[in-house]
Image (cartoon, helix red, strand yellow):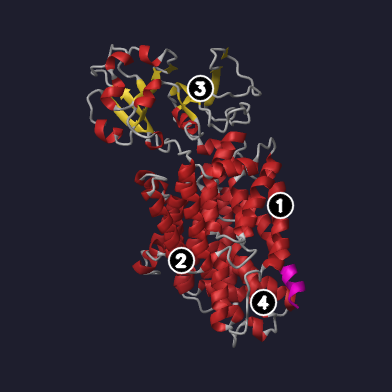
Amino acid sequence: VVLLKENWGVMLFLFLGSLGLLLLGLLSPDFENLGWQAWYVLIVLLVTLAFLIKDHLPVHVIMLGCLLLQLIPGIIKPADALEGFGDSSIATIAVLFITAEGISRTSVLLPIFRYILGRPKRLWPALVRLTVPVAIASGFLNNTPIVAMMIPVVQQFSRRTGIPVSKLLMPMNNATVMGGTFTILGTSTNLVVVALARKYLPDVEIGIFGPTRVAAPVVLVGLTYLVIAAPLFLRDRSEALTRIIQNPREYTVALTVEERSPIVASTVVEAGLRHLKGLFLIEITRSDGEVIPAVAPETRIHAGDILLFAGVVETVKDLYQIPGLVPATAQTNKIRLERHRRTLVEVVISPSSNMVGQSVVETRFRSKYNAAIIAVHRGGQHVRERIGDIILRGGDTLLLEATPDFVRRFSVSSNFALVSEVVGSAPPRYDIPHMIIAVVLVVAMIAVATSGKASLLTTAGTAAFLMIITRCMTMEQAGRAFNVPIMVALAASFALSSGLEQTGAAQAFADFLVGLCKRGGRFALIFAIYFATMLLSELLSNTAAVTLMFPIVADPDTGIAFTQNLNIYAALYAMMLAASLCFSTPVGYQTNLMVHGPGGYTFMDWVRFGVVLDIICLFMSVTMLYFLFP
């Protein structure tokens, strides 16, 4: 009974889905000749969707399970199962994550988007400032690198304004995808349709701005929906992102505001220091010695201020991502390494350590370990004494600013019971030369890829390599930028696509949907093409969806566009738009999964926010195509 109560929604979904498959098998001639393999894949698809809805397992684990369920009975071959892991589009996304890390490490986008995004106090103006620029940019640049580069920018904007990142990332992603339909350059899907048209329909010419007059009204209405619906349908997923351990280690950390810091002259709220989760600004000490113990939100920050924070290590590292905030202890200036290459490390003093009973100054800690103690946690309390005067005890947890090799060198030291690096804590660079290098490399990457002289994989890989060579980022930072769960989920989804294609299940669905509307007139026919492509794209890859639909729709001899006297441009643009405008599942478009983890989203978040947008785009697109291409 308890199991039924907790899972009634999923069980209802499975029942209705099974009933629908049964009716299709009994009543539709398009499904009559399907073998057991096709029905098996459809059942696997149903179970996969049920697990995604339940959201008890990570997306990449569910997709790997889907892959294995098809591989074990021989529905797909090992080569098909591994197809996604060797696909160039997956490799491109992986490299773009590294390129985006290089952009993030040089802080080049921060001043630009700090100006564009401003300091909105409400969600809707923040969404307008965010979605409109990325939608316009995506019309001329491929949308995948835009999303990759914008994720860290949006995360920092969220920390600065206190607006939950879950209310920003999905709208940003959807706006970028919609903007990509403005021209044939914005998405790889558009380019695939154009390439197929050139091969099989030599008389059809599609210019760069071919889809614009159809897409522009769709994007305008879609952006309006994003601004209105995000506050209503998207929940604050901060708790999912900040699942701090049950006994958090609290530290007191003092940071100095440098003159070049962008937060100088900002209020505490404007600087984003009021809304950091798990972190509290205790006091400000001015350079003239004035102490402000109860910091008001409107207090302005001056160069030379010392900001005293109390909080857990998981959020202390967020402070390190704010340019111009440096540890107040002078010991950090003596570490023999550039600051952007340092990282935060936690160490626990061993009870048998020879440092027990000595003050920090007496231990000569910085000289011995090339690391500076910036905070101490002791027995559930944050120690507020001057760092150098603290008498160390066994079990004390020290927060260090150290070199990247500290963990490797001292993890087995008898002085430390535990040594652990705080992942993602290295501060970004903030120097003009490396900003210029990063901008030049990214502009060249996109320009060359857009011109068709080289693939995006080639240009992105070159840009990432040169960013490492020019020290825009380190090799370790590049390696950490590679998001394994997203890559696995995307690659494993190719197996589901292969199973549906090879067993004929996808073809049967497309034929069934198009067949329903053949006699319903031109509007119904465009609707069927769009809906069938969109449905396939939500389940398969976008490229697979248009590749599968193209011969059904646009084959010169048997395609329904020709047999039913439908304007060929209406049919081609319907496929272009439908394959990209898929927002109701995390696997509907490749960038959806890129923001799924950072936003802390569940499968139902995509359904709740995306289904209405899918419907709006569907009816807007079909209506525009119906009137523009008679």
Q: Earlier in the sequence, mark 2 or mark 3?
A: 3
Q: Quick one: label 2, few (<14), some, or many (20+) residues within 10 Å? A: some
Q: Nearer the viewer, mark 2 or mark 3?
A: 2
Where's the N terminus, which quadrant?
A: top right
User: Is 626 in the magenta?
Assistant: yes
Q: Give the amino acid at mark 4.
A: Tyr
Closer to the eye: label 1 or 3:
3
At 63% from the left and 75% from the top, the residue drawn is 206
Among the 4 quarters of the image, the one containing residue 426: top left
Residue topped by disc 2? 455
Residue occupying image coordinates x 51% and y 79%: 33
Q: Which residue is mark 3?
A: 309
Q: Nearer the viewer, mark 2 or mark 4?
A: 2
Q: Residues within 10 Å of mark 1 (few under 14, many from 20)?
A: some
Label 2 with label 3: CB-CB less than 8 Å = no
What's the amino acid at mark 2?
Answer: Ser
Magenta segment boundaries in residue numbering: 622-630
Q: Which amino acid type is shown beneath numbered disc 3? A: Phe
Give the Cα separation between the discs numbered 4 and 1.
Answer: 27 Å
The answer to whether residue 516 of the structure is visible from this angle is: no
Going from N to C along the chain, the mark reached first, 4 or 1, is 1
**Real-space CA distance between mark 2 and mark 3, rounded to the nearest whole angstrom:** 47 Å
* Residue nearest the observer in this picture, 443 or 143: 443
The residue sitting at 53% across, 31% down in the picture is: 260
Along the horizontal axis of the image, is 133 left or right of 156? Answer: right
Marks 1/2: CA–CA distance: 34 Å
Q: Is residue 246 above or below residue 473?
A: above
- Considering the image in quadrants, where does the C terminus appear? bottom right
Chief secondary structure of the magenta portion: helix
User: Does residue 78 lie above or below 112 as drawn?
Assistant: below
Label disc, if present, on residue 569 of the rendered structure:
4
